[in-house]
Amino acid sequence: MVRGYGKSYGAISIITAFASGKGCALGIDLPVEVAIEFKRGLCEKNTFLDQCIAEVFTHLSMEMDYIPHLSIQSDIPASRGLKSSSAVANAVICATLDALNESLPPEDILQINAHISKRVGISVTGSLDDAAASLWGGVVFTDNWHNKILKREHFSEKVQAVLYVPEETRSSLDVHPLMDQINLYSFIMDSIFSMAYEGHIYEAMTLNGLVYASLFGYASNKITDAIIAGAKGASLSGKGSAVAALVPTPQVEDVVVAWGIDNVRVVEVRRGEVGDRTPQSGEII
């Protein structure tokens, strides 16, 4: 019997990649922990996570003659746009590496995650931005259509993430019928992405939220209420239903009150490393 452990975190959208393929995400302190146990046998590889595990074996040129048993503990609300799928996949991949006493460059971990996410339909774009922000923390800019990490930065701003997390959920499958309409906004979202890339994170985040809230049929009042109450930026996160606001600590209570106490969480931003560092086996930065 072989055991391994992995840990990862959620993230929020700064720029959602559906329209242009270019995305930006920021890590937040919502952890997910995975314990994996391998027993001898033939894995059928039916599920998303089974395929992530199998891809690790393939990447290492190893035969997968094990059946994985997973234990997952997550603080990330699922199907709300807070990157739970990307985070769980990261943690499972790292737990698999830990069990095998192997390591991979972080870029390889991200490529496995994005490749399988897109192949099985968990993600429309592969969600490389989400996976990278989950893995590294900080702000990450990506070109998801071309599987490229464009830039990642330490996030030094003195803000907290205030999350509105309603009971309503949304699956990635709900996005597919809307893609023709979403694609009409590709040039607009390219411009908003450029704004974020050039350093105007908060302004771009808010514009992103207003565009996608309209496209996905959400009211924009949570976004505008947060800005009025003192948030520096606010957006629908991914496909929703969660809304995230980046708020200076003195204004956090004002945003919470503006949104109402129910379904609101305040979490820390994961600021990321200053400079690059490669995770060790089973580790997430």
Image (spheres, rainbow, N blue to C red):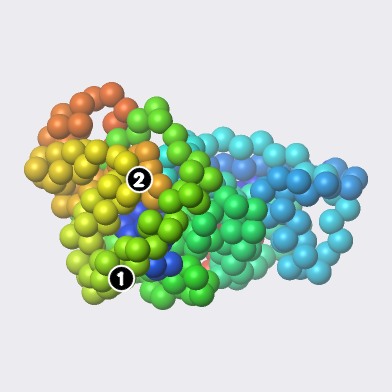
Residue drawn at the location 49% of the way across and 37% of the way down: 78
- In the image as oriented, which residue stretches furthest toward the top? 262
Q: Is residue 134 left or right of residue 53?
A: left
Name the N-terminal-most of marks 2 and 1. Answer: 1
Callout 1 crowding tier (Cα within 10 Å): few <14, some 14–19, many ≥20: few
| Residue 68 place in picture, x, y as percent | 77, 44
Residue drawn at the location 43% of the way across and 58% of the way down: 180
Q: Do tag 2 and tag 1 residues touch (Cβ < 8 Å)?
A: no
- Give the amino acid type for the residue marked by disc 1 in the picture: Phe
Tag 1's secondary structure?
A: helix
Q: Is residue 198 above or below residue 90?
A: below
Residue drawn at the location 35% of the way across and 63% of the way down: 184
Q: Is residue 226 left or right of residue 218?
A: left
- Quadrant of residue 207 within the rendered picture: bottom left
- Disc sitting over residue 187 in the figure: 1
**C-alpha separation, residue under disc 2 versus residue under disc 1:** 18 Å
| Residue 56 place in picture, x, y as percent | 72, 61
Tag 2's secondary structure?
A: loop
Residue drawn at the location 53% of the way across and 61% of the way down: 126
Callout 2 crowding tier (Cα within 10 Å): few <14, some 14–19, many ≥20: some
Q: Which residue is mark 2?
A: 216
**Relative depth, front residue between 19 and 114:** 19
- Give the amino acid type for the residue marked by disc 2 in the picture: Phe
Q: Quadrant of the N terminus?
A: top right
Q: Is residue 173 left or right of residue 63?
A: left
Say if residue 258 shows up in the picture.
Answer: yes
